[in-house]
Amino acid sequence: MNRARRLIPFYLIPISGASRAEAHASEQGFVLLLPTELYSGAGVVTVLLTLLVLGFVGQRRTGLAFSTIGLPAPGLKAVAVAGRLMALAILLLLLMAGIFGPRDPLSNPLPLMVWTVFWIGIVSVQGLVGDVWRFVNPFAGILWLLRRGGYTPKIRLPGRIGIWPALAGFLVFAGILLADPAPADPGRLARLLAVYTGLHSVMLSLFGARWLVRGEVFTVLMRIYGRVGLLARKAAKLNLGLWGWQISSSAAVPVGAALFCIVLLAVGSFDGLNETFWWLSVLGINPLEFPGRSAVMWQNLAGLIVAIVMLLVVFTVTLALGRRLAGQGASFPEVFCRFAPTLLPIALGYHIAHYLPSFLVDSQYALVALLDPFLNGSDWLGLGEFYVSTGFFNSKASVRVIYLAQAGAVVLGHIIAILTAHSVATVMYQKRRAILLSQLPLAGFMLFYTWFGLWLLASPRF
């Protein structure tokens, strides 16, 4: 038996990423004992006060919130190349582990590295810090090897294609994340990842670097999330500013990128919603007799599509109403493409909050799996015995700290989103009255989404 699994009761094993549905089971009982209504109310009030303060703050002071500091930007090209090649080597080793390693998702490093280290950890760091993915992007490593081997792009990728291939690929990824019956099965995941890697290797050989930034899902995803981060390289300098400063200072993004921002928020929201008792009640399922992911696969796919369409419609109507109230300014497509990225801090805040409990446990399993990836008694990292602990879920005090950290991430994400949206509005609408009127519908949207995100955190879930 795996040495980590010997250390915890069998009923705590579902905390791992093998099935996201059970990721919050252990701490949720204590969460239900907390005064979550008070916490949620305080969060909504905090966001409301932010909106009210912005109503009295001048445009110049709002701009100061997103001022940046220029830092030295040393050349890191060699570091980036080394990091990308190392990441590619790790990817190939993980594929081997998925195929030949243990079948237990808690012991095999592939699902733990994909769903915990990458999807939770690296995505969060990318959004918080900036574009760190450029240093560990294995697909950029493939492109470098192709260039070194003398391969040149065979076909010029038309500009009108934009990032639509990446957006379509992300929708497939979201479907696997939310509806696949066994997303953490090592063999199944290895096959999917091998097909994905092979496909994009071919596309990179055909289209070159253009495919990397338009068609490769995770490169595009990370570039979009990197716009929230504190750091960015601009004009040969490394600039440091408040989260969201890149969104505030950038021009309108293409329509595909704007839709990608909305899809990110919708996927994150439904990722929390489909775990709640409320969702099971909609499906007519007793949460105490949950039949498993395979029984709700098509319902979850349908729910995901509905969530994306609903958010798109509501956000579009919100922006259209704000533009009409302002009575001036740019065309609606430009308004849509300027304001859509302001949703990214909300998506990032909920991403961190939603996955925090499972990350606290699954990151430990990932370390154990890396110590002995093939369960042959090896110690690859030289750390000796390591024991997985879930004791922080057994105390109301520690669970309160975890829940408040989650709620804080949601509230902070909304505050940053409000600041960036207001900053964008000051650029698009010159008159103070037009700025404030344009923000009224968006303010209502932000307040509702704050309450919704906090409600998701506190809701009973299976």
Image: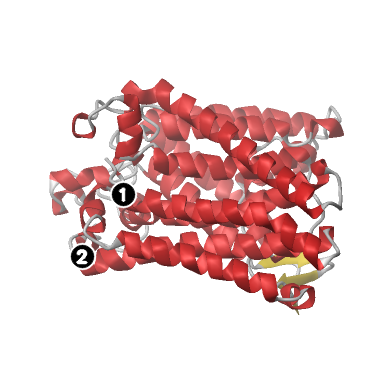
Residue type at tag 1: Asp
Using the rendered view, name the quadrant where residue 178 is placed.
top left
Direction from residue 411 to residue 211 in the image, left or right:
right
- The answer to whether residue 408 is seen in the rendering is no
Q: Nearer the viewer, mark 1 or mark 2?
A: 2
Using the rendered view, name the quadrant where residue 401 is placed.
bottom left
| In the depicted structure, whether residue 242 falls above or below residue 98 | below
Residue count near mark 1 (Cα–Cα under 10 Å), binned few <14, some 14–19, many ≥20 = some
- Which residue is located at x 39 percent, y 29 percent? 187
Return the x and y of residue 47 as percentages of the image width and height. 53, 65
> Split into 4 quadrants, where in the image is the N terminus?
top left
Return the x and y of residue 366 as percentages of the image width and height. 36, 51
| In the depicted structure, whether residue 278 falls above or below residue 457 | above
Direction from residue 159 to residue 376 in the image, left or right:
left
N-terminal-most mark, 1 or 2: 1
| In the depicted structure, whether residue 273 falls above or below residue 207 | below
Q: Whole-Å distance between the Cαs marked 1 and 2?
A: 33 Å
Residue count near mark 2 (Cα–Cα under 10 Å), binned few <14, some 14–19, many ≥20 = some
Residue at the disc numbered 2? 396
Indicate the secondary structure of the residue bearing disc 2.
Answer: helix
Observer-nearest residue: 327 or 283?
327
| In the depicted structure, whether residue 61 falls above or below residue 198 | below
Indicate the secondary structure of the residue bearing disc 1.
Answer: loop
Residue at the disc numbered 1? 372
Residue type at tag 2: Lys
Observer-nearest residue: 107 or 126?
126
- The answer to whether residue 45 is seen in the rendering is yes
- Which residue is located at x 79 percent, y 39 percent? 210
Q: Which mark is residue 74?
A: none
